Amino acid sequence: MRIRKVFSAIASAVLALQLLCVNLSAQSSPGNATNIAVAPQYDTTHVYVAPEDFDRFVGSLVATFGGTTSKQGVFTVTPTPSSTMSQLVLTPVGTLSVFGFKTPVPYPFGAERTGYLVTDFDAAVQAARTTGADVLVTPFNDPIGRDAIIQWPGGVNTQLYWHTTAPSYKALQTIPENRVYVSADRVAAFVDSFLAFSHGNVITDDAHAPGVEIGRPSDTYRRIRIQSNFGKLTVLVTDGHLPYPYGHEMTGYEVSDLAATLAQAKTAGVQVLVPPYTADQRAAAMVQFPGGYIAEIHSPSSKQSPPR
């Protein structure tokens, strides 16, 4: 009996050691690395406009959403020779990095949609590789830190960046959503890769979302909403049969009152491309800012101003 108890104790100890090793292995694997996200206010939508439209575009953003801007300057922000006007726009509903290139834009810059600030740059690049992303532009130094451009499965380009001196931005009033259009063939690979990298979670996965959200009111489509420390991401899974301007917008901005925001936007020279509609408990519209930037703007459908 005593021998049996001894063997039982040894077996339990071995099992515990095996479980500990498994847990340690999982924690040390790149896909489960420390969360390298900072916060949503440091995730910037990248907008490229012609230099002659630069000031008008920045002014229309602030007039529409409120907020402040950094000092405008001219810099080289690519690893090869180039020159661009650059300014940061800090609105209560999202942060934008605006570029007005004075020289031709080096490939593949201009195709990235969002910049993600990370706490550990080398770890972030390695995590991107390990979780299935392609590093299109390997790490390089810019005037204030380091950058790389990655591409998720499905063709979604993102910038990773790190600052030598850590920035400090106010928390956002509402978190914008990064809107990505992905095919049914690649959506599983995209979602798996992004979740592993961001340590995010799927909030909703609606296989029959209302097609009015993509300009096809008589149809349905699949919509996946993801949330992480990088912020919100909405995956629109479509067949690519999209009426203009759907697919051109990069970001959706949440405001408290859509009607009031659109009124401010129109005064600032913003064009309403898709009038307000209601779906998924939100009222939404599509707009185009001076310079060509297209965005979705939405608010909870129960919080709209009465008709005037």
Image (cartoon, rainbow, N blue to C red):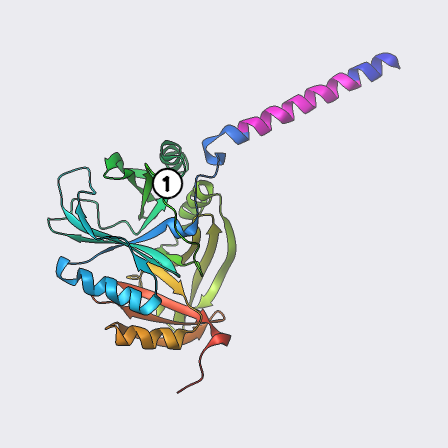
Q: Position of residue 208 (x, y in %)?
A: 48, 65
Extreme residue toward the bottom, this view: 308
Q: Position of residue 104 (x, y in %)?
A: 11, 49
Q: Tag 1: Cα neighbours inside 10 Å, few (<14), some, or many (≥20)?
A: few
Q: Is residue 180 above or below residue 280?
A: above
The foreground one among 33 and 51 is 51
Identify the residue shown where x is 34% and y is 75%: 262
Q: Is residue 1 above or below residue 26?
A: above
Q: Is residue 141 magenta?
A: no
Q: Position of residue 234 (x, y in %)?
A: 42, 57
| Residue 136, quarter of picture | top left
* Quadrant for the C terminus in the image: bottom left
Residue range corresponding to the magenta coloring = 8-25
| Residue 141, quarter of picture | top left
Identify the residue shown where x is 78% and y is 15%: 7
Q: Position of residue 97 (x, y in %)?
A: 28, 53
Q: Is residue 62 visible?
A: yes
* Quadrant for the N terminus in the image: top right
Residue that mark 1 sits on: 166
Q: Is residue 239 visible?
A: no
Kindly identify the amino acid type of the residue bearing the numbered disc 1: Ala
The foreground one among 162 and 3 is 162
Extreme residue toward the top, this view: 3
Task: Count up the numbered dots.
Answer: 1
Q: Main secondary structure of the magenta part?
A: helix
Extreme residue toward the right, this view: 1
Q: Secondary structure at mark 1?
A: loop
